[in-house]
Image: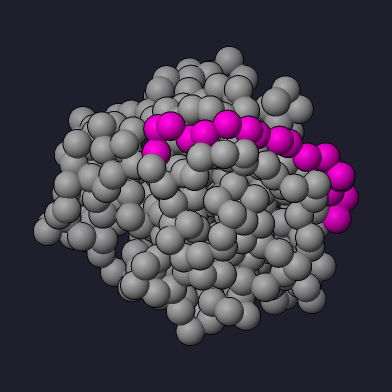
Amino acid sequence: MKVTLTLMAALAAAQSSMMSSSSMMMSGSMTASSMMPSGTMSAAMGRPSNTSICDYYTTALLMNNTAANQYSLLQLVVNTALIGNYTMPNVGIMVPGILADGMVNGTAVSLAQYFNGSIDSTNNNGMPSKMSFLDGGGATPLMNNKLPTAGSNQFTLLTHLYEYFGDLLGCSMQGNAVYSSYKGDTSMSSVHLFMNLTYPQVTYFINQVALSAASFGVAKSDLTAVGTALNGLFNVRCAPPVAFPPGSMPASQSICQEPDCPLAPMAMCMNTNGGQHNTTGTATGTGSGSMSSSGSMSSSGSMSSSGSMSSSGAMSSGSASAAGASSSAKASGSGVAQAAANAGTKASVGGIAIFAAAVAML
């Protein structure tokens, strides 16, 4: 049975049931970053269905929807997700950050170990290795909206996160010298192969990304839709291959790897370097598909502390620029298969519930 899995499908399904006319307003000058203009920043009354999340909030917060402004927006969101609040003003939502210890349903979570090189968690050409991703200055350059030291592991990770999140959020101006598309490993299962991530860990990561977006005024309806999509595609075991960025080959994207991770619908569990190495589920179907980038987040997508790194510190296989497909793939997501929406939104029910509860408290 062929399944067309798309991130936008899950997003579209969530949006159709959850979109409302809610809005958030932010005012004041962005004193922590020269990239943010002085004056009033406001999220308009509702995002049109044919406008991606990236395009909409770039215009709402930075006035002009340019490649440079889209890159600036993604820097702010990714940096805040990693290290917590560092810009003033924001809408008053506290973001502890991925590097901070946290709790998910009473379970302690500490993701810093995957960043600081203390454990063999990095996939270095198929071998588990210790690798620091704070070697380019740590939090200091991020707090100043600067790139980490060029050539460092941290530089590679952060630039890839900016690119990946941009593709996931549907940044229409991405794919050029100012803001390039993602060029790292296109299998998130492979990237996270040796991290052995649990359900609370992946859930915490996704929630920090959501809190970061919320702190800049992203509407609850958009947050809920994005969280549903992310949990359904990344916070499950053994999901069928998905092609992302657009134009790349289908690859496994499941990040949650431990037995406590929900089994994906149409699960395809196997012992491969795609990250399905410790699962106990049985495949119930086959299939692959593509993942549209419009209107959706991510991502550590990857949203992870480690990349699949080569010895030289550069992301390994899977060079996957989406430039050739970016224009059509970053449209509104119309015509998405309902089967894909069902597959995406029925996965990781617990993670969605936790995410929804967190959003409701904002």
Judge from the rendering whether residue 39 lies leftward or rightward of residue 19; answer left or right: left
Q: Residue at x 29, y 69 (%)?
A: 317
In this rendering, is residue 287 above or below 311?
below
Magenta stretch: includes residue 76? no
Residue 128 is left or right of residue 265, and the answer is: left
Looking at the picture, does residue 199 appear above or below residue 330?
Answer: above
Q: Can residue 337 be seen by looking at this rendering? A: yes
Percent x, y for residue 41?
Answer: 62, 41
Q: State whether residue 119 is above or below residue 35.
A: above
Q: Position of residue 353 (x, y in %)?
A: 73, 33
Name the dominant secondary structure of the magenta segment.
loop
The magenta-colored residue range is 16-33
Q: For this view, does 37 lie left or right of residue 317?
A: right
Rendered location of residue 128, percent (x, y): 23, 47
Q: Residue drawn 62% across and 39% down?
A: 40
Q: For the C terminus, give its image quadrant.
A: top right
- Residue at position x 80%, y 50% in the image: 46
